[in-house]
Image (cartoon, rainbow, N blue to C red):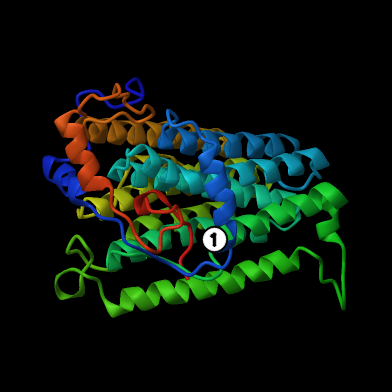
Amino acid sequence: MALLAYRDKHILSAQQLRKLSEHKYSCFSVSLLDPLLQPWWNWLVAQTPLWLAPNLITIVGLILNVVTTLILICYSPNGVEAPPRWTCLLCALGLFIYQSLDSIDGKQARRTNTSSPLGELFDHGCDSISTVFVALSACISCQLGHYPNWLFFQCFCAIALFYCAHWQTYVSGTMRFGRIDVTEAQFSIIAIHLVSAALGPEIWLTKIGIGSIQLWYGPAVTTIVCGLLSLTYVFSVIKAGGVGKNGSTVAGTSVLSPSIPLTLVVLPALMIAQKSPQNLFTEHASVYIMAFGMVAAKVTNKLVIAHMTKAEMEYLDWSLLGPSLLFLNQYFNCIVPEIWLLWFTLIWGTQDLLRYCAQVCLEICQHLRIDLFRIPYTPKGATPHPATASVSSQSNFGSSADKNGGSAHRKSKSKPH
């Protein structure tokens, strides 16, 4: 972790670290599936060794989810070729494991008395990356590469909705989950992978009913309807005003300010894809989504940190270097092959995201005197370190709406109502 961090540079100020220590997670949920899955999550966490750190559970789930998706991408990089059925089954399994581990990390934190604001931030950070790969895997499994515009819409819709969920949290101070939310979306995508595994990915191109309606229209229309409902709710919260002074955000800034970083990611992505003379998005859909997805994950993490530290959000970021070069290259009639710059965008964005997250985690760990992936062992009968006990007492807050059985700050969701 220290090797990835920035040298001689602090991202969080002393005031931000102080605000982070005081942060209390607020959550409201009416999810349909979560109560039904509680017995499974409770059983699973009971089998988890007490020495296993909650953040380690989270990162293992993310790695499995990313690896299974990358295997799928290897067989269908642009979403046109039908991937082997076993790769779809693997994605379903990877997503199920990720969803299960993501649901018990908070329970494990509660069991081991290691809850901290870092857990919430780490969970949200992993979810911001997972959202990109989950959306992309679903599109490939549905063979949406035959319809590039739809593939673009579905992936960026998921990315934008995740960002908007944290936008409304930044405004209202409370994260809200509806009856049909992220858990329901995850299990719907698992179902898509299972259908592709059982009947073959080509099944989604089957024409049904009247005209040229194909089976993939079902998930696509569902995404549109749920997306519109989510955005309607988000903007109703924003319109109502925030919890800050004069209806501002938790940081006292304009409720519309988070729209700028999102626009700086989505708008260039759309323009570059549409104006590319080399059909960059159509020919390299997976690389394109992952490249801009890493940029979106970076700005989403900065929004989460701004909320938790009650700080103003920065608009410009070094992760935007890749998209800027792609845009300027098109302006000058592509003097550099676009695919070169696209790979640069992916590599640069990924390393920038990882180094940023590593540095933030390192600073918070040093401030709270905790370990990221290790539970400090206290011998039987020994008294815990005063600083550790203080952090633990400040951070062990709960919520009746929490899905993790008491450690409310740990659970992260990608979509609001």
Question: Which quarter of the picture shows residue 26?
Answer: bottom left
* Pick the front one: 390 or 265: 390
Residue 24: % across, % down: 25, 55
User: Against 315, is 256 above or below?
Assistant: below
**Which residue appears at 76% of the width and 63% of the height?**
216
Residue underneath mark 1: 34
Using the rendered image of the protein, determine whether residue 111 is visible from the camera's viewpoint.
yes
Question: What residue appears at the point 22 percent right and 63 percent down from the top-left corner?
Answer: 250
Residue 185 location (% of width, % of height): 60, 60
Crowding near the residue tagged with mark 1, few <14, some 14–19, many ≥20 C-alpha atoms within 10 Å: many
Residue 179 x/y as whole percent: 53, 71
Q: Say which amino acid is labelled 1.
A: Asp
Quadrant placement of the N terminus: top left
Q: Is residue 276 visible?
A: no
110 horizontally vs 84: left or right: left
Left/right of residue 266 with respect to residue 255 in the rendered view: right
Q: Secondary structure at mark 1?
A: helix
**Who's the residue at 48% across and 36% down the image?**
57
Depth check, front residue: 293 or 411: 411
Residue 411 to residue 399: above or below: above
**Picture mark count:** 1
Q: Nearer the viewer, residue 101 or 315?
A: 101
Q: Quadrant of residue 148?
A: bottom right
